[in-house]
Amino acid sequence: MFVYADNAATTQMSAAAKEALCAGMEQAWANASSLHTPGQKAREQLEAARAQIASCIGASPREIYFTSGGSEADTQALFSLARAGARKGKRHLISTTFEHHAVLHALEALEKEGYSVTLLDVHETGVVTPEQVAAAIREDTALVSVMYVNNEIGTVQPIREIGAVCREKGVPFHTDAVQAVGHLPVDVAADNVDLLSLAAHKFHGPKGVGVLYAKAGTPLSNVIYGGAQERSRRPGTENLPAILGMAAALREACDSLPENTARWTQMRDRLISGLSAIPHSRLNGDPVRRAPGIVNFCFEGIEGESLLLLLDAKGIAASSGSACTSGSLDPSHVLLALGLPHEVAHGSLRLSFGAANTMDEVDYILETVPGIVSYLREISPVWEALETGRQPHRI
Ligand SMILES: *Cc1c(COP(=O)(O)O)cnc(C)c1O
């Protein structure tokens, strides 16, 4: 059996997305800025995709800016709001300790330019509260950025309530919704957000394409300079085939959301109860406030990397956290943000579902993981120290 359970890293393109992308390459290859007929046809398709994507998140088409993906959308969102704040003498930025590196590293770059950054604690639950945001906002706060769904542990933040606090205090609010769009109902108006990032490859669309939603009137500054594409805010000839693939994938994801949510929730809950039966294991993140498709566990006394390799040998593709940090031996900044000790954070496993996963696959995972965990513990000197009482158990 082969099980792909790493959909939070990326998803496989759906048939509908591939079809739209290929049709785009065949028929919509012209430059959407050209005045000739093929160019104008490409323009029409571009605007149809924009309208379709807008309707899936409750936006208006002119609030959609196509980007190269989630990282670019995050970067542009933060730099835009920071620059706009600085023009009014506001140089304080608020975010959280467990954001994606696209946000954290953009904030670090801004910090080097003289902005001051407050990163809110996400508690052991992996949830930020609106009260924390309210308490952190100052006279000189230029932006608040809080991710919708954490990509490693799957906790869902109270975005609507945080957005309401920001509105009341007049502070612009950005959310990295890359793991939310296509997985949860997202509505930019109801959620009180000013800027939102999404990426197609997290909902069965193509890689290298995403969207920055910017509420009308929100000041955007450029990350890329060039021509007049995307109202001059994101120059560069549009990757129309990819955009068409993204629109098709999002349409499909939104249409199948109720059904997928129900299925994933059942699968997730079975996975959580099965893995919880392994001694000295812990579910990371709030047990209730979580996205249907992401499960993250720590198993004491083992290395996440060894677990992944043995799972891979059994045909299960999973992750120990974020794809961006694998390869480095540092434990995940997200798990450390929850307050987990380094040695516990090292033994993590993230399983994340996509449209194609089934309950049979969950059962296969549950048949496979406990044996591998026991085997790794048998050969682990750390586990021996824990079991003989030379070191105290942390889980
Ligand atoms: C994947 C991801 C990103 C980065 O998106 P790319 O399209 O890969 O640049 C940003 N934020 C979160 C939460 C993600 O999961």
Image (cartoon, helix red, strand yellow):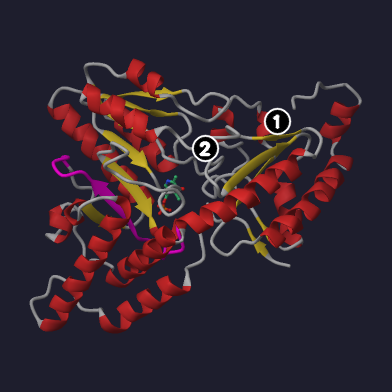
**Residue 59 % position (x, y):** 24, 50
Seen in the picture, residue 350 relative to 104 is either above or below; the reply is: below
- The residue shown at (71%, 59%) is 312
Looking at the rendered image, the disc whose residue lies closer to the viewer, 2 or 1, is 2
Give the distance between the C-alpha atoms of the residues marked 2 and 1, in whole angstroms.
Answer: 22 Å
**Mark 2 crowdedness (10 Å alpha carbons): few <14, some 14-19, many ≥20:** many
Q: Is residue 93 left or right of residue 379?
A: left
Give the amino acid at mark 2.
Thr
Range covered by the magenta-colored residues:
203-219
Q: Which corner quadrant of the image does residue 163 belong to?
A: top left
The reply to whether residue 9 is in sight is: no
User: Is residue 212 within the magenta segment?
Assistant: yes
**Residue 8 % position (x, y):** 53, 52
What residue is disc 1 on?
A: 343
**Residue 338 % position (x, y):** 57, 27
What residue is disc 2 on?
A: 155
Q: Which corner quadrant of the image does residue 249 belong to?
A: bottom left
**Residue 155 % position (x, y):** 52, 37
Q: Is residue 299 left or right of residue 103?
A: right
Q: Is residue 50 left or right of residue 219?
A: right
- The residue shown at (30%, 24%) is 165
- The residue shown at (25%, 79%) is 28
Q: Is residue 77 left or right of residue 246?
A: left
